[in-house]
Amino acid sequence: MTSILQAIIMGIVQGITEWLPISSSGHLVLFQKLFGISPPLVFDIVLHLGSLLVVLLVFRKDLLRLIKGLIQREKTSWNYFFWLIAASVPIALVGFFLNDLIKQAFDSLLVVGFSFLFTALLLLLSKYPQQKTRKLSLPAIIAVGCVQALAILPGVSRSGSTISIGLLQGVKPEEAARFSFLLFIPAILGAMLVELPNINQLPNLTTLLIGTAVTILVGYFSLRLLLKILKQQKFYYFGWYCLVMGVITLWLA
């Protein structure tokens, strides 16, 4: 059973680590291993629902602009929409065919440790983007989609890896972040749909609501902070944190 205190703590962890490029799944695995807390599946799904609401809130103008463009049959909007779909294919395939293997990865601190190190590498490399600024292109979309599929592994930051790949391709930080977080929407919806049939117990409604509220509140400010850090070109700083976390996790393993 998940207590209110545990719900608050996990909401804070989810709200911070989902958006800052340090891997929410990696931190939640460590949290559960160290404190012996294993919340019911539905609680994890609801926390991710809170994260989804944060994206919809922060990027509401971009979403409304995209929807309006689709309705008006604007070519650029439809291209962007198809790019989001295309970049979602790798994670859908990995999640569908390798679901059991991925679940095993969540029980291995070795996997988490090396995944943290992989995230650290991408973040540190993002300090050295291509000098020539480029718009989103098909090769960049494919690369972002593939690295998002790897982010299913605990310890690989979804935001960190996808934004870093965009930066390394020469995409502007604001555009790389926008695409990464809009891409989060189909990814998290798909994950929630896959896990819904596996729910076998419902925790206290008050606990669910508190955890979700904390996730939304903390997540909103965390995402705003990340966007500010990107503008200041200090995104790669998080690489050093992930490097330390990787070493600590491997030591614990």
Image: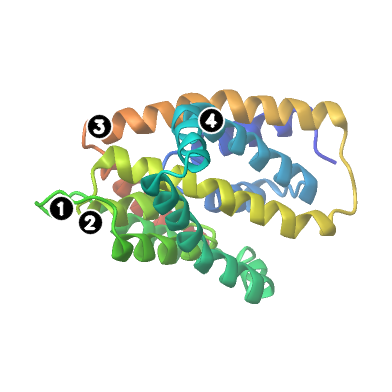
User: Label 4 is placed on what type of residue?
Assistant: Gly
User: Label 1 is placed on what type of residue?
Assistant: Tyr
User: Label 3 is placed on what type of residue?
Assistant: Lys
Q: Who comes first in sequence, dot 2 or dot 4?
A: 2
**Which of the pair 110/56 is nearer the observer?**
56
Q: Which part of the image, by quadrant, shows the N terminus?
A: top right
Question: Element at badge 4?
Answer: helix
Give the number of callouts.
Answer: 4
Question: Element at badge 2?
Answer: helix
User: Label 2 is placed on what type of residue?
Assistant: Leu
Q: Who comes first in sequence, dot 2 or dot 1?
A: 1
Residue on which disc 1 sits: 128
Q: Residue drawn at (22%, 31%), measured in percent from left and top?
A: 232
Q: Who comes first in sequence, dot 4 or dot 1?
A: 1
Mark identifier at residue 168: 2
Nearest to viewer (mark 4 / mark 3) = 3
Question: Element at badge 1?
Answer: loop
* Residue 233 place in picture, x, y as percent: 21, 37
Mark identifier at residue 251: none
Callouts 2 and 4 close, C-beta under 8 Å? no
